[in-house]
Amino acid sequence: MQDLLDSQIKPAKTINDHNGQPQDRRKAMQKRTFTRWMNVFLQRRDPPLKVCDLFTDIQDGRILMALLEELSGCKLLYRFRSSSHRIFILNNISKALAFLDDRHVKLLGIDASGIADGIPSVILNLVWNIILHFRVKEVMGGLRRHLSSSLSSLSLSTYPSTGDLSPQTGGSDSYTCNTLPRKGKKAAKEPKYHSKAIKTLLHWVQRRTSKYGVDVDDFGASWRSGLAFLTLIKSINPELVDLRESWSKDPTENIQHAFMVAHQCLDVPPLLEPEDCTSPDEQSIITYVSMFLGCHSVIDEVREL
């Protein structure tokens, strides 16, 4: 009888996201990446703060206010009220959201209740939009004007501004040659996105990597081989990477080497794990790549605009 019942039970259907990977895996990757990103800035406080579980630590609003203080230079925590009562917790979060709204950070689908309740999709969307505004948009805003003329020969691509990213061409999780040179070969048609800030970030990466024969079409499959990371590092400091050895190496080995060199020599924190690049989450890749904007030569490049 039990065998008959078991045979009638259908296995749960795995829900995939727009990248063709399970939503739980994508959320776990984003949670880990966003947590590490937040801790980079929270560790600068005196005394330092640390997020251990993003979905619970952010619920009272204190961590959120502290993060925004570090990113903006404005004071918010003096308005924080420590209390276990929901009304005060919601009030704390509402103050942080009002601060973001005043700075035109997109808050579609984000409310104080969702954050206080620790709803993963709401919190991930919130942190993503904070990253997009404070780490990508503000830095790339000036750079976009400079690049608009010099990058006219590169194919245009845009990116989304919120959590829902459109599907990429090619859904296979296997290693592809998107980052190999394609001399004399017409580049594949790229997907269309929308955010000017991320389009500019992509163009900035393309300008730096194309001179080494590496094509970067997106913030997804193009990073699987590890060559995009290595050439980005080489463009900042040519002495750090020998690309001749990298062309024949295993993608995982290239990625591990890139993360190590970026951390030790450029002070770019390792927000990702090498396995994250097997089936990349675009928001996680963008978050990591944005950290290279803090390198000295990159800062000088932006200051010259």
Image: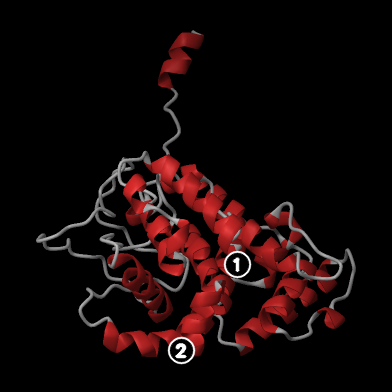
Protein image colouring: secondary structure
User: Residue at point 70% right, 61% down?
Assistant: 39
> How far across and down, in percent of the image, does residue 182 sit?
17, 57
Task: Give the residue pinned by disc 2.
Answer: 142
Q: Residue at x 68, y 64 (%)?
A: 40
Q: Residue at x 42, y 27 (%)?
A: 10
Q: Residue 194: give x, y in percent of width and height.
A: 35, 76
Q: Is residue 107 left or right of residue 19?
A: right
Classify residue 294 as left or right of residue 64: left
Label 1: element kind: helix
The foreground one among 277 and 160 is 277
Q: In this figure, what is the number of numbered marks?
A: 2
Q: Residue 25, position in %: x, y?
A: 50, 44
Disc 1 from disc 2: Cα separation: 23 Å
Location of residue 11 with respect to 191 vertically, above or below: above
Please name the amino acid that badge 1 sits on.
Answer: Val
Residue 218 percent across, percent down from the top left: 33, 63
Tag 2: amino acid:
Gly
Read off the residue under disc 1.
127
Quadrant holding the C terminus: bottom left
Q: Nearer the viewer, residue 164 or 170?
A: 170
164 and 64: which is toward the camera? 64
Task: Residue at the far left: name it.
Answer: 184
Q: Residue at x 59, y 71 (%)?
A: 110
Quadrant of the image occupied by residue 172? top left
